[in-house]
Image (tube, rainbow, N blue to C red):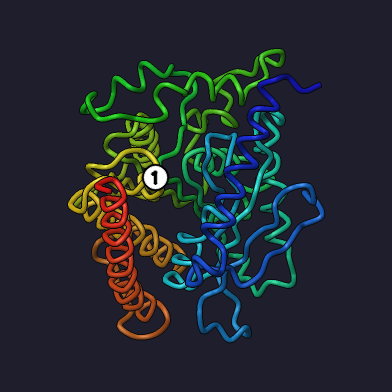
Amino acid sequence: MWSLEHVQWACIRVVANTSLYVRHSPWLSPTTQPDSVKTYQCRANLYPCRIFKPRGHSGQDTLPLVIRAHGGGFVVNNPTVDDPIARHLADNARCIVVSIDYAKAPQSKFPAAYEDVIAQSLAVIDDTDLPLDRSKVVLCGSSAGGNLVLAAAQDPRLLSKVMGVAAIYPAVDMVTDGDAKMATRPDASIPDFIGNSYSSIERLYLDAAQKPSLTDVRLSPTYFATRDSLPPNVLLIGCEHDMFCHEGEAMADKLAALTNGAKEHTEAGWRGPGVQWHKVFGQPHAFEAFPAKTPEKEKARIDALDAMFSVISEWLIDVFSHSNITDPAMDVPSEGPIANSRAQVEVNLKQESRLRRYCAIDSWRKSSSIHQD
């Protein structure tokens, strides 16, 4: 039986999902549309999966697969929210991207979303209608979706089928309380919109009567048993002013320590054997979803988003090419699909960056004009 809180969240989701469908409709977002949508019978009650293929794909060659799980605090959003990143990864990493849905709290408590991600991932991998190279499968998720893919990747049903997992500002440790997480941020004066609601989100997601252990890797992926508990390639991304940044880097450090390999420092993080850590400086959690209030800050946000997309695309290209992404001396082909993908990443990023800047500045000017009136 539904409580008042259940009704409230159901109404919030209706508003949020309607807004997403409008903002990501073919009329308002024509360049980020999926090639098709599909409902898998294993989860026919959820929003359809959105399938993206690289532009110009002939349909004859098999392609790597990226399965995307969106964020939303386990309580809101649907796969349309991931259209921009899904389209970008499909075009730049030359892969098929399938954005999946999962049941939301408080109507569906843990582990419903976890099981949904596994069931739909298996259905997508086994889909004979898709031209897939099933030896090249990566799970990718943001925020709550990052938590879910890191957890699902450790499940025996999926682990042997997945070569990598990429998690963008994921929550990976539910043992540590919200206040302690907030205390790890470098500047307490910068707002974190999750901070005040973290305990509520946790309460909505977990079943108090069930009392699950918070160290269960289905809830807290950072408590994995061994390095072999996760796929051989892991990319973790955190935002400097995000309350989840510290625990994300701690998980990356734990993975690196288990391989006894040296870290190669990068401009915004490091690489180790089988793991890469990238920090987005100057940005909060889910920064790509919230335009900044001034043109200068908006430009910084767009630059950070471009850089993050580039990191993910480059990591996918390397993983799919079976290269050792931790070896700086690796041989990179000067010709062929891998080299072409790298070149296309740079071209597409420049085009997308110019378009984002134009749209962001135009939107900011219109907003300023309205306030002045």
- At x 25% / y 57%, what residue is drawn? 303
The image quadrant that residue 238 belongs to is top left
Query: Would residue 265 be visible to someone looking at this image?
Result: no
In the image, taking residue 273 as reference, residue 166 lies left or right, namely right
| Residue carrying label 1 | 236
Where is residue 239 drawn, in percent x and y?
31, 40
> The N terminus is located in which quarter?
top right
Q: Nearer the viewer, residue 276 or 322?
A: 276
Front position in the image: 290 or 106: 290
Q: Within the image, what quadrant is residue 108 found in?
A: top right
Q: How many marks?
A: 1
The three-letter amino acid code for the residue at tag 1 is Leu
Horizontal and vertical percent for residue 348?
A: 35, 74
Does 304 appear above or below 175? Answer: below
Horizontal arrangement in the rendering, residue 366 relative to residue 101 (left or right): left
What residue appears at the point 31 percent right and 78 percent down from the top-left corner?
343
